[in-house]
Amino acid sequence: MMKNRELMDVALKAGEILLRSGAEIYRVEDTIRWICLGYNTECESFVLPTGIFISIKDNTGLEPLTSVKRISRRTVDLDRIDMVNSFSRQLHLRLFTYSEAIDELDRIEKRRQYSFFMRLISAGVASFVFTVLFKGSIYEGLASFLIGMLIFSAKELLSKTGLFQFFELLVSGLLAGALAVLSVFLFPEFRLFKIIIGSIMIFLPGVAITNSIKDALYGDIVASISRLGEALFTAAAVGAGVGIAVSLGLSWRF
Amino acid sequence: MKLTEFLLAFGGSFCAGLLFNIKGSKLLWAGLSGMAGWIAYAFVVTHTGQLFFSVFTGAIAVGVFSEVMARILKNPATVFSIPGIFPLVPGIAAYETIQYLLSDRLQEAGSKMVETLAAAGAIAFGILLVTALFKLAFSKKQA
């Protein structure tokens, strides 16, 4: 049997991995409750997009144990969500000891992403695909393939410097706008809009807006509103970047 | 022409899935999920011309596909539904809203904003509806 303090560690860590990987709020809360339930302990969790609060009731009826974890950076990593999900399922088939559980979660946390090269290529291909899917020509698609790869690598470089996320998005937008204007200068038959939407598609918060409405439909109103706000600022940062670059670029030309 | 569109939707969801770090053969299923969504969307939009209803149908297709695959492969359904809705989500509408705001065209900005929220709402509702129906049908824990 795991001590409450150890159980808290495991539940908090599982919740943290989920939230950092962009899981829905209800999934984080459910997983925490599910893990505690596996060890026959009652717990209450309250999860926000930026933090986790867990309170575990002591089975001796004494004071409850409470912990808070602040989450700052979130990405979407469906592989980790998948792994934590199967971790919490396994836990109900066979109870892990504390060190087993922590080791397993450590292993999940350290799982590698695809190599930079693979992600770069797929960012490029995604740009190509969305330009052509939204009625651009093949050549416009090829232009946004290149632009998409360039801004993806720029954003990766910037994120290593540890500046805030909106700045990265603004610069990505600026770069996308500038490169798209450049490509229109070189090939006057290109349509600016088609190239831009393809190359910034992967940065746009379409999925984030949809997920925030999903949160609202689940009843997680606080999370929903804060995610909607985040999505709004994301769109504003990328959009402003593109807008500045395009209006400067075009006025300089004409 | 239609077929290339479907393949493009597959490619879009596949690449989005890779960027969302889905591993192995699940990537193929994620791509197919996007293709299923786009086929349903394209079919309804050519026959009715109604944007939100078409997006909603697309989301239902993605939802059904994802829930079925989730039960076969024992994964959370979001692994397939998030990349699956990627071609349908209103990222571009959100971007256009900002562009209209930047050029002082407030009326267009307003209508684009409503379009963004309505499309996102239609997709979210479509996905959740399917999830709820599957939960009712097979009331298993932690699907």
Image (cartoon, coloured by chain):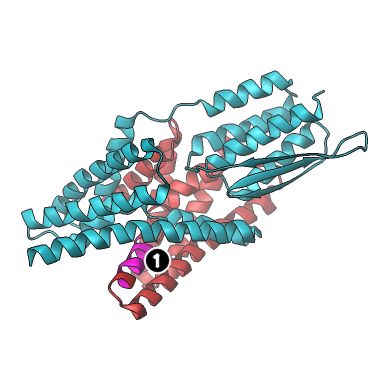
Chain colours: A cyan, B red
Q: Disc 1 marks which amino acid?
A: Val
| Location of residue A225 with respect to A175 vertically, above or below | below
Q: Residue furthest right?
A: A61
Instruction: Determine the chain carrying the residue at label 1.
Output: B
The answer to whether residue A77 is magenta is: no
Residue B124 point in image, percent of width and height: 53, 60
Q: Residue at x 41, y 47 (%)?
A: A165
Q: Main secondary structure of the magenta part?
A: helix
Mark 1 = which residue?
B44
Q: How many numbered discs?
A: 1
- In the picture, measured across the screen, residue B9 lies left or right of residue A18, that is left
Q: Nearer the viewer, residue A190 or A227?
A: A227
Q: Nearer the viewer, residue A19 or B134?
A: A19
Tell me the SS state at disc 1.
helix
The answer to whether residue B95 is magenta is: yes
| Residue B129 visible, this angle | no
- In the picture, measured across the screen, residue A239 lies left or right of residue B26, that is left
Q: Residue at x 91, y 37 (%)?
A: A62
Quarter holding the N terminus of chain B?
bottom left
- In the picture, measured across the screen, residue A86 lies left or right of residue B2, that is right
> Which class describes the residues within 10 Å of circle 1: few (<14), some (14-19), or many (20+)?
some
Q: Residue at x 16, y 51 (%)?
A: A138
Instruction: Tell me which segment is drawn in magenta.
Output: B92-100
Quarter holding the C terminus of chain B?
top right
Q: Residue at x 70, y 39 (%)?
A: A32
Residue A147 point in image, percent of width and height: 21, 46
| Residue A216 visible, this angle | yes
